[in-house]
Image (spheres, grey):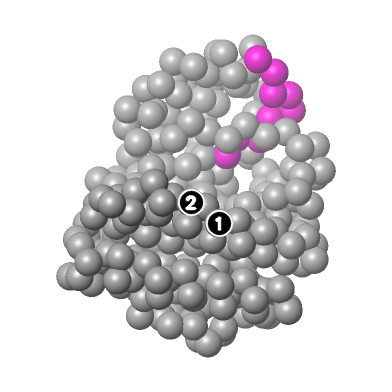
Amino acid sequence: MVELKNIDKLPESAAKKIRPYLENMIELLGNNLITAAVYGSAVTGDYSEKRSDINLILVCEDVDLSTLKKSLKLVAKGIRERIAAPLFFTRRYIETSADVFPIEFLEIKENHLVLYGEDILAGIIVDLKNLRHQCEEQIKGKLVRIRQAYLEVGLKKKGVEALLKRSLSSLMPVFKSVIRLRGESPPRRKEDILSKLAEVFSLDAEVFLTIWNDKRNDEIIGGEEPESYLNRYLLQLEALAEAVDKV
């Protein structure tokens, strides 16, 4: 049987799901598999057995259709247990793509745990210039999409609430990266990231933290009408976009 490493560093409920899944995946992929690593909430301390997906990266020598096809049944079974379909990379893809996806690759580099094979992910190099450009694009693009989405759901109370929570969650990796652009190390816990972001860029932490806490607890935002937070949220994103543009 294949020996996995670092499995004891994961939350117990996540490790219980990952162990048989990876053992079967390693058997399926054989010598083609170079690295198997977990990233995301199972590593950062935000993992919830009921709400969180388990995210895996598999680095292979080759990723062709036959490689994917032989994994289909196992991946389908994993999805039923909240193990998301893995990201399949090759070594070459990683080496040539960090300039295109700097936020994503920096997030992976700093928040992963290798469970099998060599740690290729630790050697990812991200140019801060590329990182700044993508951060600015993501924030400004999100502003446009939120306004557009509001026009579609603004007449629905639950629609605005869901829009705010979904938007904030999707921006977390961007927030971590803009903190890095200021020479600071982003915390791991989501609440601490939002507080640090507000501190570094002189933003209103309360609006971010209220939306996040109510997302986590599945409540009405701040106990008030969600729309009352929407304008404040947009103003903070506009201020952040301006600040990132000047970094």
Residue 28 in the image, given as x and y percentages of width and height: 55, 18
Residue type at numbered disc 1: Val
Q: What is the magenta range?
A: 57-65
Q: Which mark is residue 215?
A: none
Looking at the image, residue 109 lies above or below residue 97: below
Residue type at numbered disc 2: Gln
Residue at point 53%, 87% (across, down): 202
| Figure quadrant of residue 165 | bottom left
Q: Which mark is residue 148?
A: 2
Residue 64 magenta-drawn? yes
The residue closer to the viewer here, 157 or 36, is 157
Residue at point 44%, 15% (across, down): 73
Assign the C terminus to one quadrant of the image.
bottom right
Q: Which mark is residue 144?
A: 1
Q: Is residue 15 visible?
A: no
* Distance of label 1 from label 2 (alpha carbons): 6 Å
| Figure quadrant of residue 174 | bottom right
Q: Is residue 71 visible?
A: yes
Residue at point 48%, 51% (across, down): 148
